[in-house]
Image (cartoon, rainbow, N blue to C red):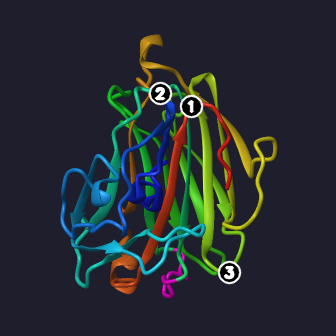
Amino acid sequence: MKSFKMKALAVATLGLGGLVMAGSAFAACPTIPATSSSPGGGGAWTSQTVTAMAFGNASSGLNSTSCALQISVNNGAASNAKGFVTDASPQNESHYRARFYVNTAGLTNATVANRQFRIFSALAVDAPSDIGAEMVSVSFIGGTTPSFRFFVGDTSIPGYKIASAAAPNTGGNYRIEFDLQQGNPGTFRYWVSDASAVTTDGTPTGTVSVTNPQASDGSGWSGVKQANLGLFITSPNFRANVATQPLIVDEFDSRRQTFIGK
């Protein structure tokens, strides 16, 4: 689990391979560098990438955790502004599940449709040349009723199949989960809920069929090898109107098969 609390306290790591007990505990949340570094997230992640962003600990975590990552765009930032942590532990996963918490309550100016940003991406090493390495990405779409938009690689288009879900509350504290199964056809299921809501494997917010074969089957993807979580690929109107306002992310967990939920 890439929870800032769990990783900082070194209690346990719950990842793609299962439960691995970690070493001795630390007394406080990690110090997260404000610049690019390796490892990232105060040591919880493989690396972090920071350009024209304020980057560090939130005053409190999400899901009753004590730590979270807070990110905001600097005033006057250009299109290459980005701030995210990277997990490089996946091993070319053809079945990949991920869950994270995101809080947008601080983005008080994100109520216009053209104010958008990306929160998450899952990438492969080998990918179709006409589509690219991203197998899944998740973006926040501002508006009177904000939404989360999923882009899933699909060779039959070719390009990305899009699935959207309206943000389920006005409080800005959400839990997002998805299940990607490669195949011809493959399946993409997703859950978008209030952070406190109970969700189950059998009741996703939505399900879409995708054509996302493995690279060994021809022109496909080699499976998920890297995940990025943070704030990046921001729209011009977002950078101009939502600069210095904080996005908070926390409690990232990735697995091969098991439903994650709360």
Q: Which residue is mark 2?
A: 93
- 110 and 45: which is toward the camera: 45
Spot the residue most to the right: 202
Q: Amino acid at mark 1?
A: Arg
Q: Amino acid at mark 3?
A: Thr
Quarter residue 167 falls in: bottom right
Image: 256 above or below 173: above
Label 3 or label 1, whichever comes before in sequence order? 3
Relative to 243, is 66 on the left or the right?
right
Q: Which residue is mark 1?
A: 256
Q: Amino acid at mark 2?
A: Glu
Q: CA distance from mark 2 to mark 3?
A: 35 Å
Residue 41 % position (x, y): 31, 59
Q: Which residues are magenta?
A: 106-113
Q: Are marks 2 and 1 in contact (CB under 8 Å)?
A: yes
Q: What is the chief secondary structure element of the magenta stretch?
A: loop
